[in-house]
Image: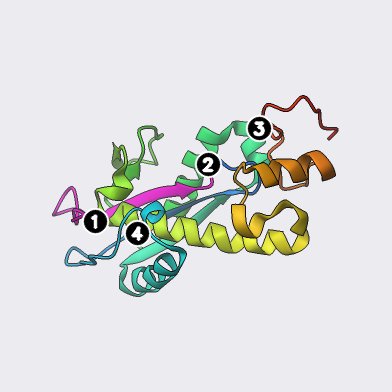
Amino acid sequence: MLLPYLHKDLLEAGCDEAGRGCLAGAVFASAVILPPAFRCEELNDSKQLTERQRYALREVIEREAVAWAIGVVSPAEIDKINILNASILAMHRAVDGLKVRPEYLLIDGNRFKPYQNLLHTTVVKGDGKYLSIAAASVLAKTYRDDYMMRLHEEFPAYDWNHNKGYPTPKHRAAIAAHGATPYHRRTFNLLGDTQLSLDF
């Protein structure tokens, strides 16, 4: 059973990101403030849920949350500032988008840069420990998946409707055959261990 909060008397926002390990596409983050009485036994780390469960839970989260928002950092920005900084920036942008200002941030992972004057706690595997982080993981994942499905329509050869930009063999084979798209992260190892080189 996931914990409802770290600090009972503070308005906490859980934050998580999706798409950090992808070769293509933006990194997405979400910030979610849940009411203290919120309970949902089905809610868990988005990686432990099926696609159908994630989208069903997204409706529950958006309906029940005190506030929620999505933050996005583009592939070009990722290449400029690196993926760790981009993931943190996406979380900052998500917090920026909240219509209710939180008093405390719960961050999935072990790295974060302070956001304005808000205190925060980083929690390794927090999406499997706290409801608000799990909720943020579901929103970040589903909104990023929607985005990758739209990109797939533009570039169907890369199998993004299945791999969502992650480095699968089929994805890397398409990069080797067709080259990189404007959505690929140029600073990433796009071809893996193959000896081929790409012309950008």
Asked if the stretch drawn in magenta spans residue 172, the answer is no
Cα distance, mark 4 to mark 1?
15 Å
- Residue type marked 2: Arg
Q: Residue at x 77, y 61 (%)?
A: 154
Q: Are marks 2 and 4 in contact (CB under 8 Å)?
A: no
Residue at the image position 35 percent from the left and 75 percent from the top: 63
Residue ranking furthest to the left: 8
**Residue 40, how many percent across, how many down?**
24, 67
Compared with residue 148, is residue 37 higher up or lower down, i.e. above or below?
A: below
Q: Earlier in the sequence, mark 1 or mark 3?
A: 1
* Mark 1: amino acid: Leu
Q: Which one is closest to the eye, mark 2 or mark 1?
A: 2
Look at the numbered disc 3 and give the secondary structure of its residue: loop
State the CA–CA distance, disc 2 to disc 1.
27 Å
Instruction: Give, as a three-letter code, the residue at label 3.
Output: Phe
Q: Do tag 2 and tag 1 residues touch (Cβ < 8 Å)?
A: no
- Stretch of the chain drawn in magenta: 1-20
Mark in the foreground, 3 or 4: 3
**Residue plotted at (39% across, 35% down):** 112
Q: How many marks?
A: 4
Mark 4: amino acid? Ala
Residue tagged 3: 188
- Circle 4: element type: helix
Lower position in the chain sequence, tag 4 or tag 1:
1
Q: Is residue 102 visible?
A: no
